Image (tube, rainbow, N blue to C red):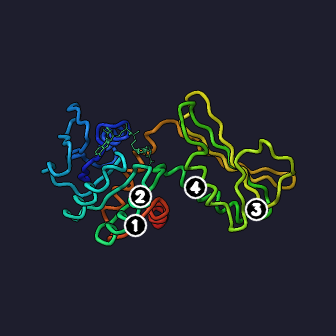
């Protein structure tokens, strides 16, 4: 059993990780959460300085504000970390790079393995279908604030070249599509947890590759896989690409 210290333990994602840990051969030995509510099966502390349990890795689904204390604790105890929180600023990213000189750090804004398979397939398709028009469509529930999703932008990075230009929706445009455009379109409605489609539109054929999230447990499962992976790594920064390559090696 991989012993995990879970940061953000009382949040929506923290609870998912705790619920799925056992199935993933992991045990949450303790949690850290500024709003510890006492209804977890493991002790939850309001700060890292109070943790006494020994863990093998830290998994974080809290907020960027937790980062300084989390990295200080991880460095002091030589613990690898999985950073799943989003919204880090440039200073945060610099401190993550600095910490990665001493400890192994896994970070991804999207912990779903399936999304990363979509990314890898889309990248290959873009190479195999040169000249095809590429359009990315993402769909999310009506409570999502930002558009397009960070994952749509990640997919854009996977299929674009230095010559490509992103076009966010086509409203107001009065010219035909240029060859170097990639359209990115956001749909908002209902309770859709998240859908991403990369379409390749060529002469007389269309290839579409789609990922549909059915609930948020996919991020928890991915983070638990990342925890097993990072526990065995040397200091440095790692992401889903490294995990996928490791899985392909068998
Ligand atoms: N990487 C991914 O795939 C992925 C997927 C889903 C969510 N997220 C991110 O994970 C984070 C958590 O998401 P959520 O939906 O569970 O949010 P949430 O608000 O339900 O949970 C966050 C938890 O962190 C705690 N917290 C806040 N500040 C803290 C601090 N300084 N120290 C310790 N704990 C602190 C809160 O009390 C709360 O219990 C967000 O940043 C979200 O964007 C990432």
Q: Residue at x 20, y 47 (%)?
A: 47
Q: Is residue 193 left or right of residue 43?
A: right
Q: Residue at x 25, y 55 (%)?
A: 69
- Earlier residue among tags 3 and 1: 3
Q: Quadrant of residue 217?
A: top left
Q: Nearer the viewer, mark 2 or mark 3?
A: 2
**Image vertical order of residue 99 relative to residue 178, above or below:** below
Q: Which mark is residue 237?
A: 1
Mark 2 residue element: strand
Badge 1 density bin: few <14, some 14–19, many ≥20, Cα 10 Å:
many
- Earlier residue among tags 1 and 2: 2
Estimate the x, y position of residue 90 in percent, counting from the top left.
44, 60
* Residue labelled with disc 2: 107
Badge 2 density bin: few <14, some 14–19, many ≥20, Cα 10 Å:
many
Q: Nearer the viewer, residue 239 or 189?
A: 189
Q: Is residue 83 left or right of residue 149?
A: left
How much space separates mark 4 and mark 1, taking CA atoms?
Answer: 18 Å
Q: Nearer the viewer, mark 4 or mark 3?
A: 4
How much space separates mark 2 and mark 3, taking CA atoms?
Answer: 31 Å
- Earlier residue among tags 2 and 3: 2
Mark 4 residue element: helix
Q: Residue at x 41, y 58 (%)?
A: 107
Estimate the x, y position of residue 120 in percent, counting from the top left.
59, 59
* Residue labelled with disc 3: 129
Badge 4 density bin: few <14, some 14–19, many ≥20, Cα 10 Å:
some
* Residue labelled with disc 4: 154
How much space separates mark 3 and mark 1, taking CA atoms?
Answer: 32 Å
């Amino acid at each position: 059993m991989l012993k995990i210290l879970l940061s953000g333990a009382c949040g929506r994602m923290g609870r998912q990780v705790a619920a799925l840990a056992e199935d993933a051969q992991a045990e949450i030995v303790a949690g850290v959460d500024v709003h510890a509510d006492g209804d977890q099966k493991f002790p939850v502390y309001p700060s890292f300085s109070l943790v006494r349990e020994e863990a093998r890795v830290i998994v974080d689904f809290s907020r960027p504000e937790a980062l300084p204390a989390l990295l200080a604790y991880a460095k002091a105890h030589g613990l690898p970390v999985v950073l799943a929180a989003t919204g880090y600023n440039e200073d945060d990213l610099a401190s993550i790079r600095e910490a990665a000189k001493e400890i192994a750090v896994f970070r991804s804004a999207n912990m779903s393995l399936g999304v990363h398979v979509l990314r890898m397939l889309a990248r290959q398709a873009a190479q195999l279908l040169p000249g095809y028009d590429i359009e990315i469509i993402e769909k999310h529930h009506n409570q999502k604030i930002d558009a397009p999703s960070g994952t749509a932008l990640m997919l854009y990075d996977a299929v674009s070249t230095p010559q490509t230009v992103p076009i966010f929706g086509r409203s107001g445009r009065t010219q035909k599509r240029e060859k170097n455009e990639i359209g990115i379109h956001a749909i908002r409605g209902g309770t859709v947890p998240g859908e991403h489609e990369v379409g390749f539109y060529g002469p007389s054929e269309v290839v579409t590759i789609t990922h549909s999230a059915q609930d948020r447990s996919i991020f928890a499962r991915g983070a638990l896989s990342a925890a097993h992976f990072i526990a065995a790594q040397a200091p440095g920064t790692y992401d889903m690409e490294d995990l996928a390559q490791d899985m392909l090696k068998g």
